[in-house]
């Protein structure tokens, strides 16, 4: 029974580590998309051509 308590404690510690890592990366801007906005206008022309051809 003691091993279950140990495994719960270890898994909780690992989960907290990954949560803290995710929050740190999100706050640091790791998941910001800097590339898509610059090429978004290039894809709009293709959508307009498809609408006109229909």
Image (spheres, rainbow, N blue to C red):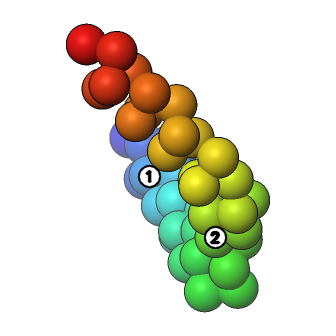
Residue at (62% x, 63% y) in the render = 37
Q: Quadrant of the N terminus?
A: top left
Q: Quadrant of residue 10?
A: bottom right
Q: Label 2: which residue?
A: 32
Give the x, y percent position of residue 14: 60, 59
Q: Is residue 26 left or right of residue 9?
A: right
Could you classify mark 2 by the number of other residues whose Cα lies within 10 Å: few (under 14), some (14-19), or many (20 or more)?
few
Q: Closer to us: mark 1 or mark 2?
A: 2
Vertical position of residue 9 compared to residue 2: above or below = below
Q: Is residue 2 left or right of residue 22?
A: left
Instruction: Please tell me the numbered disc located at residue 20.
Output: none
Q: Give the structural element (helix, strand or loop) at label 1.
A: helix
Residue at (44% x, 52% y) in the render = 8
Give the x, y percent position of residue 30: 72, 71
Q: Residue furthest front?
A: 52
Mark 1 or mark 2: name the one nearer the start of the chain: 1
Q: Is residue 21 left or right of residue 53?
A: right
Residue at (69% x, 53% y) in the render = 39
Report the front residue among 49 and 47.
Answer: 49
Q: Label 1: which residue?
A: 8
Q: Give the structural element (helix, strand or loop) at label 2.
A: loop
Vertical position of residue 21 compared to residue 29: above or below = above
Residue at (70% x, 63% y) in the render = 38
Measured in 3D between alpha carbons, the distance from the residue under mark 1 to the one under mark 2, in whole angstroms, is: 34 Å
Report the front residue among 16 and 45.
Answer: 45
């Amino acid at each position: 029974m003691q091993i279950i308590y140990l495994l719960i404690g270890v898994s909780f510690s690992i989960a907290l580590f990954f949560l803290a890592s995710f929050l740190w990366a999100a706050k640091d801007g790791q998941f910001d998309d800097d590339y898509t906005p610059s090429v978004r206008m290039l894809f709009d022309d293709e959508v307009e051509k498809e609408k006109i051809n229909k």
